[in-house]
Amino acid sequence: MIAIDLLEKYGALRKSFAKNEIIFKENNLPAYYYQIVSGEVKMSNYNDDGREFIQGIFYKEQPFGEPPLFLNQKYPANAIAVEDSEILLLDRNSFMKLLGENPDISLKIIENLAQRLYYKSVMAAEMSTQEPEHRILKLIDHGIVYFNFKKDINGYLINFTRQQIGDLTGLRVETVIRTIKTLEKKGVLKIINRKVYR
C-alpha cells in the first residue's frame, strides 16, 4: 500500500508479532497506522456465545485498523497475528503528516477503505439473504480480486481455512465443509490435497 521506505522516512518502526499474538485489543483507542511487511493478520471479535466473527483478514503490504485511527474512536475488534508477522507501526501524528504531504497516498488509502466498505456491504446482504453456496463463492471471488490469491495450473488457491470461511460468512464450519464438497461435485471448486481452488 504505502512504500516501506516512505513509512520509515516518517518514523515507522518494524515490530515482530508471534502467531496468535494480539496486536491491539477491541475497545482500545488507536495510536498507530499498521501495515503488514510479512505474515497475516485477522481482525475479529466474539459474540455472547463465544463464537468468533472475523471482520477481515489482511496480508502482506495491506494496512489494517485505519478507520478508528481516522475517527479517533475505539477499535471495534481485536487484531491478532494469524502467523508470525512483521508489521510497520507509524504513530498517528506522523501518519497524518505523511498523508498531508503526499496526496497521492491519501487517494490510495481512500480507495482501499472504499473497497473494504463495498465488500462489507456486499457480504452483509449475502449473509442475510443468500444460501451457503452463494455466500462462499462471493467471499472466494472477492478474495481472488482483493487478496490477489495465487493462480497455478489448478486455478486460484483460496488462502482461507474452512474455519475462516465460516467466520467470514457467518456459517458453521460443518456447513462450509459440506458446501465446498457440493461445489466440488458441481465442478465450481476443486479440492486438491485438502486445498481449495477456484
Image (cartoon, grey):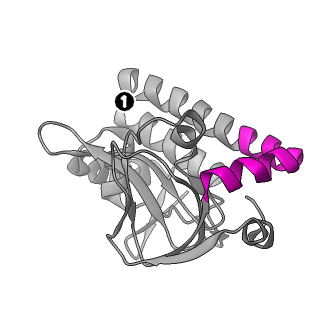
> What kind of residue is marked 1?
Glu
Task: Please say whether residue 98 is one of the residues in the magenta stretch.
Answer: yes
Q: Quadrant of the N terminus?
A: bottom right
Relative to 38, residue 188 above or below: above
Q: In which quarter of the image is the C terminus?
A: bottom right
Which residue, given by chain and number where applicable, does mark 1 sit on? 131
Evaluate whether residue 179 shows in this view.
Answer: no
* Span colored in magenta: 91-111
Q: Residues within 10 Å of mark 1 (few under 14, many from 20)?
A: few
- The picture places residue 131, in percent across and down from the top left corner, at 36, 29
Whether residue 195 sits left or right of residue 90 in the image: it is left
Q: Main secondary structure of the magenta part?
A: helix
87 or 129, nearer to the observer = 87
- The picture places residue 196, in percent across and down from the top left corner, at 45, 63
- The picture places residue 148, in percent across and down from the top left corner, at 66, 59
- The picture places residue 24, in percent across and down from the top left corner, at 39, 57
Residue 27's quadrant in the figure?
A: top left
Q: Which residue is the extreme one toward the front? A: 93
Task: Please say whether residue 90 is one of the residues in the magenta stretch.
Answer: no
